Image (spheres, grey):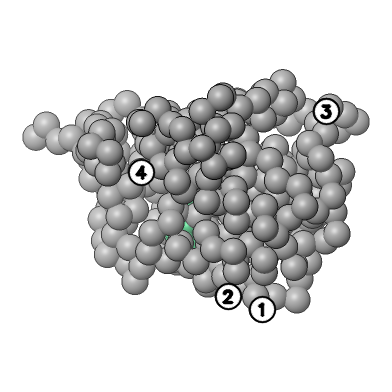
Amino acid sequence: MDLWFTEKHPSGVGLTCRVTKTLHTERSAYQDIAVLQTQGLGRMLVLDGLVQTTEADEFFYHEMIAHVPLFSHPCPRHVLVIGGGDGGTVREVLKHPSVQRVDLVEIDSRVIELCRQYMPSLSTGLNDPRAVVTVGDGIEYVRTTTRKYDVILVDSTDPIGPAVVLFTPDFYRAAASILNPDGILVAQSDSPISNPESTSRTYAFIGESFPIVNLYLAPVPTYPGAVWSFTMGSKKHLLLPDAVSGRPPLETRYYTPEVHRAAFALPRFVIDLLRGGCSNVRS
Ligand code: SAM
């Protein structure tokens, strides 16, 4: 059978790929989960009909959500990842020799279990003794934990279903309160092309809880709009002009110090969007 999967975006645009095998589908307590074997993108994790990650292009997203903040912090030891049950972000965090412990707080245990089973190249980091996995709601965790962190990474689904709370001022305030005085938070903040309102709202909310806020961009070929944004809230550190000075380079496929610096160079329509102009390619 010639089987194709299409992710349908509200804009009326979609991403289509050929599925050679449906490896798993189920309805968990939180969402519809599918793991597909595709012809061109390797294995693909789909939640509620939306592509979360593929073996072919996961490195763009996971390297950029992890290495930009970790190389912007002078010595990241304790890291918290909210969401990210596929394990890709934890895998990248653990490449930094200074990291002593990374907590992963994922609400859906089935995402963790299925990625361990079907996407081991991503979940490998979850087996590292420095990785501590907690199944729970990220907002409850940041409100109740007594731990303090150097870096918090919000690797959540888009603001629908259980992830809505992770895009609220309350969440960012609580997250800021468990960061050390020189801590950094980075949240995936949607595509300024396919969902500009979400990007500008996330940027504004993070700016309410952090004295320094910066947005950076990276391509993620299988995400709507293909250009993805990450918002960095920092208590102290400005973007370091030489992000990796004095630290050994890591084995990466997308990230380089030059890419790090360039990611903060914003196109005009994104600058206008963050100023409240909401100018974007759809208008
Ligand atoms: N990179 C992806 C993206 O941008 O689309 C995100 C991938 S990751 C699989 C997102 C994870 O966030 C999902 O597994 C989902 O279960 C989890 N999640 C959603 N809401 C959450 C919450 N309130 N607390 C913790 N994890 C949550």
Q: Residues within 10 Å of mark 1 (few under 14, many from 20)?
A: few
Instruction: Identify the image quadrant of residue 109.
Output: bottom left
- Calculate the distance from the C-alpha at mark 1 to the C-alpha at mark 2: 6 Å
Q: In this view of the protein, which residue sits in the foreground, 277 or 200?
A: 277
Spatial CA distance of label 1 from label 3 is 35 Å
Disc 3 and disc 4 in contact, CB within 8 angstroms: no
**249 relative to 276 in the view: left or right:** right
Which part of the image, by quadrant, shows the C terminus? top left
Farthest-out residue, front: 277
Q: For label 2, count other residues whose C-alpha is less than 10 Å away and answer few (under 14), some (14-19) or many (20+).
A: few
Mark 2 beta carbon near ligand 1 (under 8 Å): no
Residue 16, given in percent of the width and then of the height, sits at 24, 32
Q: Distance between the residues labelled 3 and 4?
A: 34 Å
- Whether residue 116 appears in this view of the structure is no
Q: Determine whether the residue tagged by mark 4 lies in a helix, strand or loop.
A: strand
Q: Which residue does the numbered mark 1 point to in the structure image? A: 144
Q: Is mark 3 within 8 Å of ligand 1?
A: no
Q: Which residue is identified by label 3?
A: 241
Percent position of residue 50, x then y: 33, 47
- Name the residue: 87% across, 29% down: 245
Residue 205 percent location from the top left of the image = 60, 56
Q: Mark 4 points at which residue?
A: 51
Residue lying farthest to the top in this orientation: 258
Q: As displayed, is residue 53 above or below residue 148?
A: above
- Per the model, the C-alpha gap separating discs 4 and 1 is 31 Å
Quadrant into which the N terminus falls: top left
Q: Which of marks 4 and 2 is nearer the N terminus?
A: 4
* Residue position marked by numbered label 2 in the rendering: 140
Q: Residues within 10 Å of mark 4 (few under 14, many from 20)?
A: some
Q: Which of marks 1 and 3 is in front?
A: 3
Say whether disc 4 or disc 1 marks the residue closer to the N-terminus.
4
